[in-house]
Image (spheres, grey):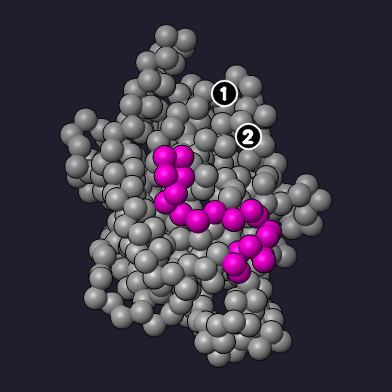
Amino acid sequence: MNESVQKMLGMDGKEKELSPWIPLGIEEIKKRDDIELHVIAPFFRILRNKTFSDQNVNYYCIRIGMPIFKRPWPARYRLDVWTNFFFFNIQVQNLVKKINPDLVNLQGAENAIYSASILKIKRYPILITIQGFITLNYQNDSKDSYIKKRLQIEKKILSGMKYFGTEASFTEDYIKSFNPDSKIFFFHCPYAKPIIKTDVPKEYDLVFFARIDKRKGIEDLIKAVSIVKIRRPMVTLIIIGKCDESYVLWLKKVVEEKGLNSNVIFKGYILTQEEMHNEVSKARISVLPTYNDTIPGTVVESMHLGIPVISYNVGGNPDLNLEDEHIILVEKGNIEKLAFEIEDLLNNKEKQIKLAEKALKYASIEFDNANSINQLILAYRKIIEESSKLTPKQN
């Protein structure tokens, strides 16, 4: 979901931008003449299925959720979960059979609403692009029926498929713990490359922009800010992102209890990435103490914006510092150390500038979207070639 997709769907332009790496990747593929891409995606915010084409890309937007209403099934009546996503899956199967592609690329195994459909697709080479792992975020004893289904589906995909694409080295060992015979391809997901605005006046010391969730480290960050405030009473943190309303209210209560009402600003969700990046640019430091990630978009976008980053030493973050220190890493859960690094960087403007410059130079080369799609297409070709030797595709 982005502004372009909304226009094609006849929406009012007020929908939230979602999964930006997918439309960004599609835009890169539109620049090529050697690929015909068919995009199948579920949508809550449409009343009927819609299909349309744009250059070499064909879109199949499948309506899901409650009949008549533009909304998902309520938590207590998840017909889609109860039916194992049957209605969406059967449409995907029919479309794939009609398209008869050379390869099917599933974007993410963790969202069962659409990922479950890949288990029904036969006779085609399949690449699973890893976006993250729900199995690293939730335990099997979760009482939420949808979470249980997501865990179940992700495990089936990780165990049963052969080809996987990822951008973080740690994921290879994790996938192979489920599937020792799997084959891994490395390439970056496309990232939004924001325009650097050096003349933006700094209004905040810190910015957190991501899904507002315990697993993204927002609670740790608030605790760290309360420590920093002891020596820097005027420290400021702006929080940008979406989350459950009840969780925001609870976080605001925590902020109040810690005496941080004048220090922490909840900005809410900003609809477009451009507007969001403009607000992020007003901060001196970007902080994301995430508990589990591949390579977070927040980190890469901050690097592109020329803002120094502090994050936890988890997932794909260590890969960013293999050649030099491009972001500051802290041991996961070490809130005292997180507070120390925040205060140390705030007190050292020269260090802020140097870290930001190194990170921007690195990100400009490492996270080039055209090159990322080139690597993806190379993976496609290798998988198609290898698969054709084993089982020729049947019409």
Tell me residue 293's x, y (percent).
56, 50
Tell me residue 251's x, y (percent).
65, 78
Give the number of marks: 2
Q: Which residue has dot 2 on it?
A: 174
> Which amino acid does the dot numbered 1 rest on?
Ser
Towards the viewer: 353 or 199: 353
Q: Quadrant of residue 303?
A: bottom left
For the residues labelled 2 and 1, the Cα–Cα distance comes to 11 Å
Q: Which residue has dot 1 on it?
A: 182
Q: Going 45% across and 24% down the picture, which residue do you hit? A: 125
Q: Residues within 10 Å of mark 1 (few under 14, many from 20)?
A: some
Q: Which residues are magenta?
A: 320-340
For the N terminus, the quadrant is bottom left
Tell me residue 263's x, y (percent).
55, 85
State whether residue 254 is above or below residue 90.
below
Closer to the chain start, of discs 2 and 1, is 2
46 to the left or right of 340: left
Q: Secondary structure at mark 1?
A: loop
Towards the viewer: 251 or 53: 251
Query: Is 59 included in the stretch rendered in magenta?
Result: no
Q: Quadrant of residue 155?
A: top right
